[in-house]
Image (cartoon, coloured by chain):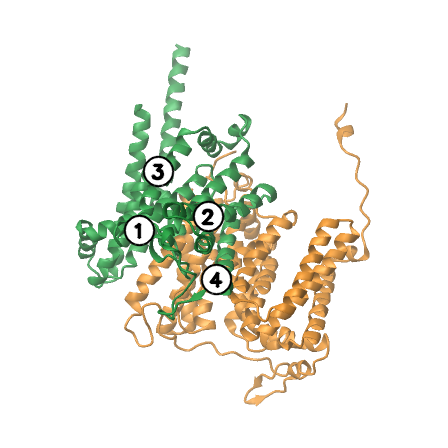
Amino acid sequence: MNKQKLQRMAVTSASSILAVFVALAICAVILLITGKDPIKAYSTLFGAITERNVQLDTLNRATPLFISAAAVAIGFKMNLFNIGVEGQMRVALLTTAVVGAAVKLPAPLHVLFCLVVAMAAGAAWSSIAAWLKVKRGVNEVISTIMLNFIALGVVAWAFDEFFRVESETESLLVKTKTLPESAWMPDIVDRRLNGMFIVALLVLLFFWILVWKTKFGFRLRASGANGGAARVTGVNPKRMIVIAMLISGALAGLVGMRSLLGDVHAYQNGLAEQQGFNGIAVALLGRNHPVGILFSGLLFGFLSAASGQLQLEDIPKEIVTIMQGIIVFAVVIINGAVKRYDEQRIQRKAAAELERQHEVVAA
Amino acid sequence: MSTVELLPAPAPAPRQSVFQRMPRHRRAMLLSLGALLIVSVVRVFTEADDLTSSGTVSATIRVSTPILLAGLAGLWAERAGVVNIGIEGMMIVGSWLGGWAAWHWGSWAGIGIAMLGGVLVGLIHAVATVRFNVDHVVSGIAINILAAGTTEYLSIIAFKGQEGGGESQSPPGKKGFGSFDMPFLTGGNIGSWKTPDILGWIENKGIVLISDMAGIAKGFLSDLYLPTILALSLVPFTAWLLWRTRFGLRMRSSGESPQAGESLGVNIARVRYQALAVSGALAAFGGAYLSCVLTNTYRQGQTGGRGFIGLATTIFGNWTPFGVLRGAVLFGFPEALRLRSDDAVMALFWVGAILLAILSVRFFMKARVVPGVVSLGVAALCVYTYNVVDAVPQNLVAATPYALTLIVLGAARQQLRPPAHAGMPWRPGENH
């Protein structure tokens, strides 16, 4: 690895870590203003790291974040902003719950089948945004936001109208038909860590190979870095948009599977809520790189897993959400500032070099 | 060869119908009169009287106002060249501050303090996007996360354990806004004398078109709140400001071509800071309208995606204030109708069917068979739905604004003209 690359990596990680500390500092001020003791809060929060339950819960909560962050990041790599992960996830959840309950298959195949159905459903929903972008020139940010709300309405309607089954034991809980046990994703640690964690790690690995080790990935990054140059070398931008959006949607379909196949085993309202949105923050903090996503996913997972402990100290756990918001803000602002500084440094260096050459010529 | 020869021959002016040649405002008036006629005929034969009742109209105005304010917030930001995804977050902040301040000092204080808070959030968005050149969408998302988290946290600190308040709800505000009616026209009071309600009398006669017009007029002139009037007056004010003042010209130049504006001495950064401060204030006003005017408490999740509907109206309204108003009313109408009666919502299917049938006739006249057949088919589907379904599911009504916006974006993009530079990165002094 050359020096330049190493330097860049160091700067990137340093700025992300700095962002986390900035957020911690600002939240400490908020805690102080609202009459809470920040030292006690942070020692409680980070003290929880030694507890086995919190550790396992961290991994469990990081699972959907890894996947949704990868889904967002693959779009980001070519400046395509898929805000619709939440909606794609929701469509995939109901589809998988219904289709998965309707078929009979042996255990490992059934789980695999469910995952494939989820990916297909997610990709199908994202294909609307892809079509609108490629054929009608509609900005994907707007279309995916609108599609999120449409998914919310349509899925809630379809669930209410066709697929709900009143539970006999819990009369208030309305769900779809429960999936047969052959479709359940087994736990790694009973009731603490679900097998989807392995799938999420595989997704990150797939993401890394796809983007950094394949011809497609090279084209993807080239389109993001310099669309014009990529087009001149024969990359078809529309094709790239469609493929990237479909892969992103397919991954988005997997986001909710930890909750569906590993936990509830049926669709219900509010299942896996927000897990698609949270991936955006994780992808931003992780700088759209699998290793970065791994760390930031673990951080966000840990924050929400440990936040329950704060309640015991009479500190609202919502401080963690504030922290996550500030982290996102801090990381993008610091990145912007660093990039700016870097550009200026390069400009100064180039100017000095030119000056020197000029002097040599003059002499 | 001289360049003159290279120019294409001027195309012969297309033949225009009488309708196309008339001035714009008269055409708009004729169109709305035609639409009203359709609605009023549908009202008569479906017997859904709520379709144009004064109660529906006045409910529509109340439901549409927060959407309108959110749409204007989007308009202000995007006209200055900054995309604002954070409107929802700004509305959340507004609704929280509105509920909190109304609880302490009354409703006007609620709106005022909410707007101040909105200015602050708008300026955060401005610092991020203008000073640090952060991607506008990313900054907006961060604002949404932050707003939700902060208000949830502060609710527990400020409202929990208070009388009438709770973890996710503020105690009721002091002194709500009194509504008032116009004297003589809609039966308002002069002193203690209750004047006759002339429009209401005509409305109850049930005559096609005339009663409908009276009902709509009564809806506009009765059960009024001052903040509503304030919000509605912002529409012509924004239009005047954008197209008749120096500030408006500068703001539009910032949205269309900041380089060009800058080269003429416009301080683009300052314009964007100002526009985003106003954008935040408007969104927060919309939020405070929910917690101070429509109800008298803040509730968590009260905004319910209205910020995003506002964003949709900005697009739907083609980035013009009156367009935003039209979009807000269109999106607010089904919601208000649903609040009053489900039958009336079903009658909308007939209205849709008739409009689509007219559209398909126009397509056929232009020999465009496919779109003609499609709209005729959808029209038939509307009639079928009316006959089969009893009530429109609420979830689908909630999704219609977004679906309509997508359809407009996909089908009529040629007619939309967003500010050319909205959402693009820009730094002072670059690209000259």
Image quarter of residue A338: top left
- Left-right relation of B179 to A319: right
Q: In the image, which disc is placed on residue A61?
A: 1
Which residue is tagged 4?
A163
Between the C-alphas of marks 1 and 4, the distance is 28 Å
**Label 3 element class:** helix
Chain B's colour is orange
Which residue is tagged 2?
A117
Residue A126: percent from left, percent from top: 50, 47
Which residue is tagged 3?
A290
Q: What residue type is disc 2 on?
A: Val
Category of crowding for the residue at label 2, using alpha-carbon neighbours closer than 10 angstroms: few (below 14), some (14–19), many (at least 20):
many
Q: In the image, which disc is placed on residue B156?
A: none
What chain is tagged by disc 2? A
Marks 3 and 1, the one that precedes in the sequence: 1
Between the C-alphas of marks 3 and 1, the distance is 17 Å
Q: Indicate which label's residue lies in the foreground, 4 or 3.
A: 4
Figure chain in green:
A
Category of crowding for the residue at label 1, using alpha-carbon neighbours closer than 10 angstroms: few (below 14), some (14–19), many (at least 20):
many
Between the C-alphas of marks 4 and 3, the distance is 37 Å
Image height check: is A122 above or below B344? above
